[in-house]
Every structure is written in C-alpha cells, then in structure tokens.
Image (cartoon, rainbow, N blue to C red):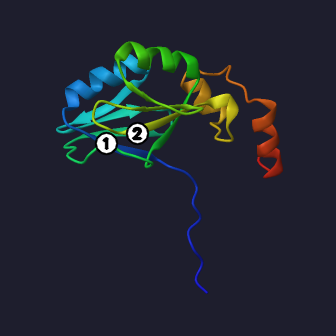
C-alpha cells in the first residue's frame, strides 16, 4: 500500500468578499493584524505562520454551517470590536459571526484550545505571554503533544 501524506496544518484559508477595500476596512476595525501583501483582487492578512486570503468576487449567499474557526488572543475584545463594527453576531454558546459578505467565522481564544504556535512564532507576533488553560494542556498531553 502506498503511503499517504499526513495532514500537518493549514497554511491559509481564502474567503470571498464583494469589495476588497471595504473588506479590509471591516477586518481592520475588528482585528489587529499586519497586511502580509496585496495583489489585484486579493489581500493577505498575516497570522504569524499562517494567513487569511481575502479575495474579491463573492456571489454566493451567506454561509450556514460552513465556517472558518479563527484563533484570537482575547475573545471578549473581539466581541466588543464586532459589536462596534455592526457585525452579525450569530446566536449560540460561542462567538460566531458573519462578515458583511456572509462569511461565517467562529472565534476561539488561544488559551482554550489545542492549536499551538511555537514560542518563536508567538514572540515574532509579539504575543510571547500567551498561555494555555489546564484543560487545553491536558488535551495536548493526552496526544503526546505537551
């Protein structure tokens, strides 16, 4: 049997918007990020060793269950910014929202989940003080990852 490639992670996710400049304005009101780059019709929002690609040209209706899970350092700060920006915050126990183009995002806080950045990446992002909760550390240990 041939060996299969092992899933390692996600380099980037792409979302489609109707207007790239309006989208960048919206995301800048909600999140603190560096613009990794921009080409005609696309922009790349830096997340350290990953990025969110924002592409002009969305024509489909709003997302339902399909969503993108994004990780932040402070979920309550994200909630406040989303409210101030007039984002559609979806009902539920977490923090889910749709951007003005219908892209569905689920916001989770770094300390609560298994997802981990290396110390070097955290330092490079000026997030060197982020820690994991005991629950998240336990989940990582169970997998031999912590």
- The residue to which callout 1 is attached is 62
Q: Quadrant of the N terminus?
A: bottom right
Distance between the alpha carbons at the discs numbered 1 and 2: 8 Å
Camera-side residue of 91 and 75: 91
How far across and how far down the image is residue 122, in percent?
Answer: 60, 28
Residue 146 at least partly seen = no
**Mark 1 Cα shell of 10 Å, populated few (<14), some (14-19), many (≥20):** some
Q: Is residue 39 left or right of residue 95?
A: left
Residue extending farthest to the bottom is 1
Does 89 appear above or below 16? above
Residue 9 x, y percent position in the rendering: 55, 51
The residue sitting at the front extreme is: 91
Disc 1 + disc 2, Cβ < 8 Å: yes
Above or below for 10 versus 98 = below
Q: Nearer the viewer, residue 23 or 99?
A: 99
Work out whether 97 lies above or below 79. Answer: below
**Residue shown at the point (61%, 24%) measured from the top left:** 123
Please give the name of the residue rendered at 75% of the width and 37% of the height, measured from the top-left corner.
136
Q: Residue at x 24, y 48 (%)?
A: 60
Relative horizontal placement of residue 18, taking residue 146 as reference (left or right) = left
The quadrant where residue 15 appears: top left
Looking at the rendered structure, the secondary structure element under dot 2 is strand
The residue to which callout 2 is attached is 104
- Tell me residue 17's x, y (percent): 25, 38
Q: Quadrant of residue 130?
A: top right
Q: Is residue 72 visible?
A: yes
């Amino acid at each position: 049997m041939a060996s299969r490639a092992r899933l390692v992670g996600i380099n980037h996710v792409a979302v489609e918007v109707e207007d790239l400049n309006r989208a960048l304005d919206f995301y800048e009101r909600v999140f603190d990020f560096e613009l990794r780059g921009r080409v005609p019709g696309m922009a790349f929002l830096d997340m350290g060793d990953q990025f969110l690609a924002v592409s002009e040209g969305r024509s489909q209706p709003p997302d339902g269950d399909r969503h993108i899970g994004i990780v932040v350092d402070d979920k309550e700060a994200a909630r406040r910014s989303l409210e101030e920006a007039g984002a559609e915050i979806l009902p539920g126990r977490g923090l889910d929202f749709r951007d003005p183009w219908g892209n569905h995002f689920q916001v989770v806080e770094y300390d609560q989940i298994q997802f981990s950045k290396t110390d070097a990446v955290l330092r490079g992002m000026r997030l060197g003080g982020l820690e994991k909760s005991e629950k998240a550390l336990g989940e990582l240990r169970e997998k031999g990852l912590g």
